[in-house]
Amino acid sequence: MDIELGKAKKTRRAYGFDEISLAPSIITINPDDADVSVKMGGIKFNIPIIASAMDGVVSPQTAVLMSKLGGLGVLNLQGVWAKYDEADKILDKIASVPKEEYVPLMQKLYLEPTKKELVVKRIKEIKAAGGIAAVSSIPQEALELGPIARDAGVDIFVVQSTVLSTKHKSTTSAPLDLKKFCTEMKIPVLVGNCVSYEVALTLMGTGVAGVLVGIGPGAACTSRGVLGVGVPMATAISDCAAARDAYFKENNIYVPIIADGGMAVGGDVCKAIACGADAVMIGSPIAKSTEAPGRGFHWGMATPSPTLPRGSRIKVGTIGSLKEILLGPAKFDDGSMNLVGALKTSMGTLGAANLKEMQQVEVVIAPSILTEGKVYQKAQQLGMYK
């Protein structure tokens, strides 16, 4: 329903995860029987969780571990692992610099060009250790890096930017022809990010294997503050899920959508699936793992922009192993660990036997959690009470 913002502008209400809740039905199932597997690009994953293509989240080693735990880790080809042979030394420097020196250092470090030989080396490292190799690139460099990654044996290629469309206008560079790119790559290509029905639908028509949904909701992303761009995640996922279903009905081709960003705890993951996502891409929860390369820090992909940084370095700390964060057992009661266990338990409570059934559960508009007797829990999390 349209709402009048003023005489010159009509708008509509959109919702974030904090504004919705999931309603039980008359059916419950054993959480152990809940199937949380998902298929993307012809590859079956036992858990619907992808580690974000961020330097504080995914290293070649983390990517391998994500694969072994049933998910997927995406290595950023504009990141330090494809720019520096001794990437660990660079990560040590990023983690140790004072806050006031952080942005200038990042801008300097990330000016180093991506090296083709390192792209090949990192992919081969992941494959040799038994991992599923997935890498990401911005559209401007995808034409060059895509074939290199493909020939090195990459399993999935991700084309990702803050906002991606099929109708890009520029006076300085030719737009990436996604349809041609997907055809020539001959491997699954995931693309993002978008937040609307129309864009998701047009992206699916290019032959992609999945669409990433979310602009600016991530813990380390400041795009909404800097650019004012984005749509709250619950609404964005639902709109793009409608596009997926319409595309399937018309073409008999199912293109999964991946909710990307804004999910810090297990309840957020559950809500993302319930709103229509087939999988989720998360950064800050995985950055908290002992195996994460960020040394207890997490930063956004747009942080090192030479002219307009759109991501901050946040201290997330280290709370446990990657296995504990994904599969448990949890050592804390705040939803930050055992994300898959939370999803299965939620599905059991809601009577959803698999992710497709989870997408069909009732979602209700709910008041802020602070108005439902949780004020002391939130205050404790903020350090107001010990």
Image: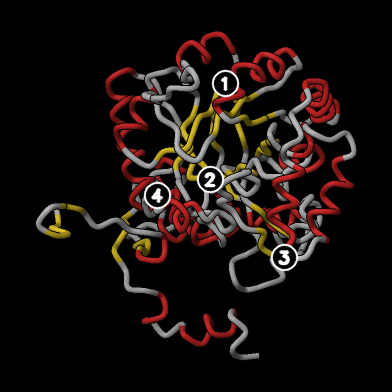
Q: Quadrant of residue 139?
A: top right
Give the residue type that dot 1 points to: Pro
Q: Residues within 10 Å of mark 2 (few under 14, many from 20)?
A: many
Closer to the camera, 96 or 267?
Answer: 96
Q: Are marks 4 and 2 in contact (CB under 8 Å)?
A: no
Q: Circle 1 sits in a helix, a strand or a loop, which is it?
A: loop
**Residue on which disc 4 sits:** 229
On screen, residue 371 versus residue 52, left or right, reads left
Measure how far apart labels 3 and 4 are at the Cα level: 25 Å
Residue pictured at 37% horizontal, 64% vertical: 21
Q: Circle 3 sits in a helix, a strand or a loop, which is it?
A: helix
The percent coordinates of residue 127 (x first, y second) are: 80, 26
Q: Residues within 10 Å of mark 3 (few under 14, many from 20)?
A: few
**Residue on which disc 1 sits:** 188
Q: Residues within 10 Å of mark 4 (few under 14, many from 20)?
A: few
Q: Circle 2 sits in a helix, a strand or a loop, which is it?
A: strand
Colour setup of the view = secondary structure
Q: Which circle, 1 or 4, is nearer the viewer?
A: 4
Measure how far apart labels 3 and 2 are at the Cα level: 30 Å
Of the numbered discs 3 and 4, the one sitting upstream in the chain is 3
